[in-house]
Amino acid sequence: MAEHPSITRFREALDAAGGTGEIRVLPDSVHTAALAAEALGCEVGAIANSLLFDAEGSPVLILTSGAHRVDTDLVARTTGPLTRADKDFVRAHTGQVIGGVSPLGHPAPIRTYIDPWLRRHPVVWAAAGHPAAVFSTTFDELVRMTGATELEVA
């Protein structure tokens, strides 16, 4: 079976960024951090959720531990006002769909923040451009590839 085009685009972005992780395609039923962690055999905190927010028309990407919910009031002290991005905003700024937004491979750079709690895990897993695809990485590699700034998000 051929690889989905969005995963192929992500693979190219990962290679271009010098990423070393493994890409895995999970069952379609794995649509939460808890289910992904179970399928991968890792702690839910090792899942790096990629959440796109709308900061008064500009995209802001938050890479947060699957064990956390983003406190938008806390994060807004650094980013300015945030609202949850709708599917059209997400697609326009990432080229990906909600549930499959990866930390990299977007049409243009996106201001990105990362939850320091992800540092607690030797391997973290993040979306690979498709709702059923994830890739392995490390906290330091993820910061290097995305240019993310550490920020307490919960």
Image: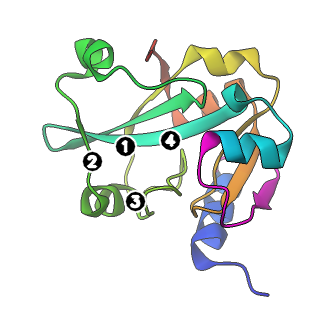
Q: Residues within 10 Å of mark 2 (few under 14, many from 20)?
A: some
Q: Which SS class for mark 2?
A: loop
Compare residues 35 and 7 and report the one nearer the observer: 35
- Label 3 environment density (alpha carbons within 10 Å; few <14, some 14–19, many ≥20): few
Residue placed under numbered mark 1 in the picture: 52
Q: Amino acid under label 2?
A: Ala
Task: State the image coordinates of residue 65 (x, y, percent, origin top left).
Answer: 59, 27
The answer to whether mark 3 and mark 2 are in CB contact below 8 A is no
Q: How far is mark 1 from mark 2, CA to CA?
A: 6 Å
Left or right of 151, for residue 17: right
Residue 34, x across and y down, in percent: 67, 39
Tell whether label 2 touches label 1 (CB within 8 Å). yes
Q: Position of residue 125 (x, y in %)?
A: 71, 40
Which SS class for mark 3?
loop
Q: With respect to residue 34, does 106 lie above or below? A: below
Decide which of tag 2 and tag 4 comes sooner along the chain: 4
Give me the disc on residue 85.
Answer: 2
- The Cα–Cα distance between marks 3 and 4, rounded to whole angstroms, is 16 Å
Residue at the far right in the pictured view: 41
Comparing labels 3 and 4, the label whose residue is closer to the camera: 4
x and y percent of residue 132 in the render? Answer: 65, 63
Between discs 1 and 2, the one toward the N terminus: 1
Magenta region? 17-33
Q: In this figure, which residue is indicated by the disc labeled 3?
A: 107
Disc nearer the start of the sequence (3/4): 4
Q: Are marks 4 and 1 in contact (CB under 8 Å)?
A: yes
| Marks 3 and 4 close (CB-CB < 8 Å) | no
Kindly identify the residue that appears in the image at 30 percent across and 23 percent down.
72
Q: Residue tagged by mark 4?
A: 50
Q: Is residue 49 above or below residue 89?
A: above
